[in-house]
């Protein structure tokens, strides 16, 4: 069953994130992806939205498609104007990519090309609108398309420091849904209690919620999140659990797997993010019983 | 980057002590040519006179000696003993040095150190004379380098007889002193220091009472190679002393005639060591008391050593500086008069022996040399340097390390030596290293198809082997073993002459296997491997029988058993060598990129040092900005501006072409081996993962500024840390001017059960801040409550200055800590004054706590787990050898510097950062990684693809290949042998340790028994 069908029939969808290489050697990406075939519903391919120049998501998505794996690619506004965005969306669809997520992007200051010019011709809401316009058969200039795409489109809900910020973010997300987003990808879950109340509040968005499970790789990473992202809900318990483990890497995989299976009941899907440790994805799925 | 001016590429190292040797070896390993000179006739300096070294109580000679004689190094190091630098012209890159060499009267190439001349003319021939006033001919140490005697011709009455006494014809009475001019690019001064001669002090009776000895003389008395052969006896009557006293700071930290004001830094530790060794060997029979002013055990884990001395060994410690030592008429006993710590009346105590703990002095001739070549000295006659460049003298191109820079112990000397070597190296033109040894070697002879033709060569190693077993008989026995065509005694096998003989025999007799009955392969295998290789044999065709360490040393008192075992060892070696076959060392290209973890002063200094040399550096910092702890320090004790220095470092680092700075970056995984590491870094708020490939790693992860919840810190505005006060003094000087009383408490959160070590920097911070308070506000009264004031070296000058300016220093013990209570805008501090014997209350406007460092336990554990590095109990990284390799970590290719190693000052951190860069450079200079030949290989015909090796390998190397059998990549194999021992089909063999060789050895061993 396709990603879109599972989503619309309310079944639990499993997404795994895989990054394209900085360079043209795709062998690692391909071999990691092969091992997931049949085990995930789709692979999410981020673009350069995190500020690191590398192979575009379009190419990554096409590679997945060639392997027979459904892809969800990121689209964002910092690096392309409305012409490029529309063109790439058409290209993606023509090459077999049916799912996109509109994401926000890091500022150039945090990018590996500080001097690059930001574009931001459209905003996220406008981009969602643009996708809907293309699906309606015209481009943003109102000119008729020779064949229109039909995407399953998602959006994101950004991590929030506190309750007030969360209210605002929820409001913004509601607008994104109104603008056409059919599912919402939400931030990493570290604390299941907090996640419960989060789901309750996000429910009335009326579209499937797909929370993220982030593979912590070391005590250092856990501590970093605890210190720098107070809203993420990293707990001292998790840090101590990793510290005490005899095989820390394995413990991190277990924590990720347990989190995946714990949220299965309360959300419509999960996005598993391993950032560099894609070879660990099968183990996380094993752990989660998927 | 340096400009491309043509420089002379040689470095002159003056002084062959620990520091000079380390510097010379580092340079040689980095491919530089070095001239190492020493004024005495054998190198090794002060350390070779020590019985053992703290804190491990090891004898470190065996760790040092092999480095001195390693043959590969000889290609780059020219050693000139009996030689001094007499003049220096020119400038950096192009110096002309005049070296004057005293006649040795012995031809080094011919001398085998057989000892004949020494036996017959003990007054004339020195191994190294003058080191012990009781035994003018004693050996400095049995493994002297160069391994040869020297002659004092002035004392010789019959020159002809002396010449005739030498069987090797090495004595040349016509030898003259020579002066030679050499061109060098840069110079390292490592002349060391002299020890203070306490006979100038009349109150301690040194030179009057025979039982008053210096600490170095006591060291010699304890030493097995010393004048008493290790027997603890007192000089006056040869009796074993029951009660020994040490008096600290003799000639140091004093203002009277003949004394110096500075602290000699190393003496507290070595007095403790001498007392511990004494207690260890003689237990309750000998009481040991140390009279001290402050116990300065500030180095890595030194505080623990101090606690062990007190608690485990029962060394008695008396805080008092004795006034005098008085002889007790004719008994040889000595009375020490002192004022006890608690303020009671003067006491007199009788001891059998008194040890004066003496410190360091710069020799007048060193000071003259310094002046002549134009480098500035400080007021104490040491080389003047600054905190941010501790090994750089005032003259460009001339560097300094060790005691001549400031009084210090061995690890800090080794650190500076590597730092000086690196800095001297970077003055010279960059060079490409080609391995000289490979180029000059003859082609390897093909021995396949030849039957084994074994030569057995047996050393006597002086008396080490020859004194216990009859070498000639052993040779005769060896000659009868199967396939042995040559068996010969070769005296000192490691001497040049013996090695030449071995090579001649290989060529003459067509030997294709060699056994050397000698010492440990650990130290000498490489030498003999090189020897056979130069004679055209593959280096794996030689086998060492460890006659010395495994036989004659351990069975010294049972010569018959030893003789039997020697035969067994030789038989085993012959049996094994017959089956050995030529092996090829596997090599891989060296990745020359560098990973520096930690972006504080240490990390940036290391990165800039290597970046300037043209290496690509990745600098990974977990926080959002560079600078580390030093960002919060404004001034050094000496008044240097730390803020500007750090800012400059940050700017240079961030704008450096060769350095990639990754902030907010975390290390998450690590694989590979030295020369080809791969480390996964997660960086930025985006947590982007990026693998970094690099050849070596420098850990400069620092420590945390401690902030314990004590004494109302963070609860009352008047309570701050010394760091806070440092900033306060700069930013809010006006407020300081209104203060009346300032109290400082030392050792807050350090030297406690939770954080047992000394934080090293807080005493000087307190002195620094006290002086600045007084300067801003001369009316203010400053009280420093301390446990021991630890201001080593020239920091002592500032401590003295603080006392002169009226700062009140009051001692407290862990059992009577001060108490603090809020009192309006200020606090009231209550403490016991041991001299007045009562409690005192001070209403303080400011209470500054000396909080020091604490290791970042969690993150060092995290990194330690990822990199598989060991740590100390208090979570600092543990170096490979606490004395001799203070920046090398136990995993090759890893180096540590700064407060990740131990609490230390900026000055020490900078030195260690450069040292780490220097040690790294010795790796990076190579083009290839030698993997050795000990790798596992699979016999595919026997392999059943059972996967046992795949599971057994701790490094995950074996895999079942497309042809269906296990494959082991030699580039990844660590040679541990686990798979070879697990393989049920015996399909895996570990090269160099193959089953048939081991079985042959066992057959050789057990033949006698069946």
Image (cartoon, coloured by chain):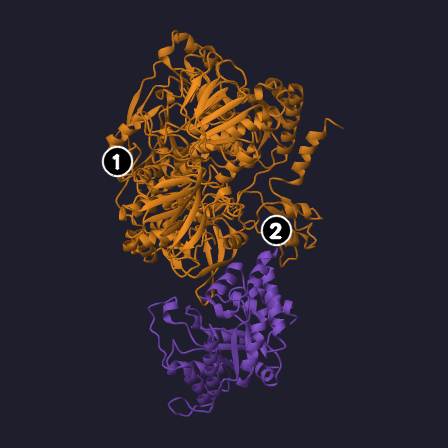
The residue that appears at 54% across and 81% down in the rendered structure is: A201
Dot 1: what SS?
Answer: loop
Same chain for labels 2 and 1? Say yes or no.
yes
The residue tagged 1 is B376
Task: Give the mark nearest the N terminus, 2 or 1.
Answer: 1
When the figure is inspected, residue B193 is found, relative to residue B810, above or below; the finding is: above
Taking depth in this image into account, of A23 and B918 the one nearest to the observer is B918
Q: Residue B877, percent across and down?
A: 50, 47
Q: Which lettered chain is shown in purple? A: A
Q: Residue B87, percent across and down?
A: 25, 29
Q: Residue B449, percent across and down?
A: 61, 36
Report the disc number at residue B900: none
Colour of the chain lettered B: orange
When the figure is inspected, residue B659 is found, relative to residue B541, above or below; the finding is: below
Q: Residue A75, percent across and down?
A: 45, 78
Dot 2: what SS?
Answer: loop
Can the viewer see residue A193 in this picture? yes
The residue tagged 2 is B954
The residue that appears at 53% across and 28% down in the rendered structure is: B277
């Amino acid at each position: 069953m396709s990603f879109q069908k599972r989503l619309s029939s309310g079944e639990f969808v499993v997404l795994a994130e895989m990054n394209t290489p900085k360079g043209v050697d795709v062998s690692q990406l391909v071999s990691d992806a092969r091992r997931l075939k049949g085990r995930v519903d789709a692979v999410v391919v981020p673009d350069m939205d995190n500020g690191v120049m590398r192979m575009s998501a379009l190419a990554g998505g096409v590679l997945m498609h060639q392997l027979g794996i459904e892809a969800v690619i990121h689209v964002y506004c910092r690096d392309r104007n409305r012409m490029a965005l529309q063109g790439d969306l058409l290209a993606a669809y023509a090459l077999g990519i049916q799912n996109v997520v509109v994401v926000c992007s890091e500022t150039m200051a945090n990018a590996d090309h500080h001097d690059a010019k930001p574009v931001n011709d459209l905003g996220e809401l406008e981009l969602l609108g643009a996708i809907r316009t293309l699906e309606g058969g015209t481009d943003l200039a109102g000119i008729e398309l020779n064949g229109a795409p039909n995407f399953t489109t998602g959006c994101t809900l950004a991590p929030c420091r506190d309750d007030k910020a969360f209210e605002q973010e929820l409001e913004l997300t509601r607008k994104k849904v109104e603008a056409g987003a059919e599912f919402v990808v939400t931030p990493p879950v570290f604390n299941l209690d907090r996640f419960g109340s989060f789901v309750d509040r996000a429910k009335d968005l009326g579209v499937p919620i797909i929370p993220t499970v982030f593979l912590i790789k070391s005590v250092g990473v856990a501590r970093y999140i605890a210190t720098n992202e107070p809203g993420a809900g990293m707990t001292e318990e998790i840090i101590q659990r990793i510290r005490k483990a005899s095989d820390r890497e394995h413990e991190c995989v277990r924590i990720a797997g347990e989190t995946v299976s714990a949220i299965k009941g309360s959300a419509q899907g999960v996005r598993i993010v391993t950032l560099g440790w894609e070879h660990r994805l099968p183990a996380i799925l094993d752990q989660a019983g998927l | 980057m340096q400009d491309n001016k043509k420089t002379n590429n040689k470095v002159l190292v003056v002084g062959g002590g620990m520091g000079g040797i380390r510097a010379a070896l580092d340079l040689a390993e980095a491919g530089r040519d070095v001239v190492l000179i020493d004024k005495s006739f054998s190198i090794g300096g002060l350390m070779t006179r020590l019985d053992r070294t703290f804190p491990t109580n090891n004898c470190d000679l065996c760790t040092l000696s092999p480095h001195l004689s390693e043959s590969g190094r000889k290609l780059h190091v020219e050693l000139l003993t009996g030689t001094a630098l007499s003049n220096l012209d020119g400038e950096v890159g192009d110096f002309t040095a005049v070296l004057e060499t005293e006649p040795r009267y012995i031809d080094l190439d011919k001398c085998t150190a057989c000892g004949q001349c020494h036996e017959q003319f003990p007054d004339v021939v020195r191994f190294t004379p003058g080191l012990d006033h009781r035994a003018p001919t004693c050996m400095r140490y049995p493994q002297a380098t160069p391994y040869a005697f020297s002659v004092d011709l002035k004392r010789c009455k019959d020159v002809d007889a002396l010449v005739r006494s030498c069987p090797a014809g090495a004595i040349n009475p016509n030898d003259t002193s020579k002066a030679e001019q050499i061109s060098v690019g840069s110079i390292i001064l490592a002349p060391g220091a002299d020890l203070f001669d306490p006979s100038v002090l009349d109150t301690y009776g040194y030179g009057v009472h025979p039982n008053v000895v210096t600490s170095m003389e006591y060291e010699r008395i304890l030493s097995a190679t010393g004048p008493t052969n290790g027997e603890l006896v007192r000089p006056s009557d040869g009796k074993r002393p029951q009660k020994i006293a040490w008096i600290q700071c003799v000639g140091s930290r004093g203002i009277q005639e003949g004394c110096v004001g500075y602290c000699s830094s190393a003496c507290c530790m070595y007095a403790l060591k001498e007392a511990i060794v004494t207690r260890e060997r003689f237990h309750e029979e000998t009481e040991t008391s140390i009279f001290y002013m402050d116990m300065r055990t500030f180095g890595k884990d030194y505080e623990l050593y101090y606690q062990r001395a007190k608690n485990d060994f029962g060394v008695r410690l008396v805080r008092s500086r004795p006034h005098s030592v008085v002889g007790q008429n004719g008994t040889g006993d000595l009375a020490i008069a002192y004022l006890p710590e608690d303020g009671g009346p003067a006491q007199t105590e009788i001891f059998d022996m008194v040890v004066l703990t003496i410190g360091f002095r710069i020799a007048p001739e060193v000071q003259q040399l310094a002046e002549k070549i134009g480098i500035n000295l400080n007021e104490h006659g040491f080389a003047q340097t600054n905190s941010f460049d501790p090994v750089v003298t005032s003259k460009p191109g001339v560097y300094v390390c060790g005691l001549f820079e400031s009084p210090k112990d061995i690890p800090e000397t080794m650190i500076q030596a590597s730092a000086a070597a690196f800095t001297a190296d970077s003055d010279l033109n960059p060079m490409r290293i080609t391995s000289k040894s490979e180029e000059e070697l003859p082609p390897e002879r093909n021995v396949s198809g030849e039957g084994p033709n074994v030569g057995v060569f047996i050393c006597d190693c002086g008396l080490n082997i020859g004194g216990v077993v009859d070498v000639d008989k052993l040779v005769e026995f060896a000659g009868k073993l199967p396939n042995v065509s040559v068996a010969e005694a070769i005296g000192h096998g490691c001497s040049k002459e013996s090695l030449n003989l071995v090579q001649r025999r290989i060529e003459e007799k067509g030997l294709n296997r060699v056994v050397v009955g000698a010492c440990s392969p650990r130290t000498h295998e490489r030498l003999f491997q090189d020897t056979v290789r130069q004679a055209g044999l593959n280096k794996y065709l030689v086998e060492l029988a460890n006659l010395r360490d495994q036989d004659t040393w351990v069975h010294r008192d049972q010569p018959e058993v030893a003789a039997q075992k020697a035969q067994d060892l030789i038989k085993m070696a012959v049996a094994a060598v017959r089956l050995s076959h030529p092996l090829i060392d596997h090599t891989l290209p060296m990745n020359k990129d560098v990973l520096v973890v930690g972006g504080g002063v240490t990390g940036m200094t290391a990165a800039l040092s290597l970046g300037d040399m043209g290496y690509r550096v990745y600098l990974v910092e977990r926080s959002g900005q560079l600078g580390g702890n030093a960002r919060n320090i404004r001034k050094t004790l000496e008044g240097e501006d730390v803020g500007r220095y750090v800012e400059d470092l940050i700017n240079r680092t961030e704008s450096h072409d060769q350095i990639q700075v990754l902030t907010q970056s975390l290390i998450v995984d690590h694989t590979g081996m030295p020369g080809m590491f791969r480390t996964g870094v997660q960086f930025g708020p985006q947590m982007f993962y990026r693998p970094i490939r690099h050849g070596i790693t420098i850990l400069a992860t620092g420590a945390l500024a401690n902030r314990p919840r004590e004494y109302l810190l963070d609860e009352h505005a008047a309570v701050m840390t010394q760091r806070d006060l440092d900033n306060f003094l700069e930013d809010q000087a006006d407020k300081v001017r209104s203060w009346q009383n300032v109290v400082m408490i030392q050792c807050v959160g350090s030297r406690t059960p939770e954080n047992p070590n000394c934080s090293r920097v807080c005493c000087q911070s307190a002195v620094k801040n006290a002086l600045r308070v007084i300067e801003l506000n001369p009316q203010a009264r400053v009280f420093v409550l301390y446990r021991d004031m630890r201001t080593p070296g020239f920091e002592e000058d500032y401590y003295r200055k603080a006392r002169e300016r009226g700062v009140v220093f009051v001692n407290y013990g862990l059992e009577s800590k001060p108490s603090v209570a809020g009192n309006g805008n200020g606090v009231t501090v209550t403490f016991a004054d041991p001299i007045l014997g009562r409690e005192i209350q001070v209403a303080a406007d400011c209470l500054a706590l000396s909080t020091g460092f604490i290791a970042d336990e969690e993150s060092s554990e995290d990194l330690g787990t990822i990199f598989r590095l060991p740590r100390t109990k208090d979570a600092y990284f543990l170096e490979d050898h606490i004395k001799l390799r203070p920046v090398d970590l136990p995993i090759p290719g890893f180096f540590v510097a700064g407060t990740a190693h131990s609490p230390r000052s900026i000055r020490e951190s900078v030195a260690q950062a450069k040292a780490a860069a220097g040690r790294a450079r010795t790796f990076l200079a190579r083009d290839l990684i030698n993997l050795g030949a000990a790798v596992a290989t699979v016999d595919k015909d026997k392999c059943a693809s059972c996967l046992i090796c795949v599971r057994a390998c701790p490094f995950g190397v074996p895999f079942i290949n497309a042809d269906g059998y296990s494959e082991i990549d030699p580039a990844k194999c660590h040679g541990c042998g686990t798979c070879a021992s697990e393989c049920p089909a015996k399909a895996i063999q570990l090269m160099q340790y193959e089953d048939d060789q081991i079985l042959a050895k066992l057959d050789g061993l057990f033949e006698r028994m069946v």
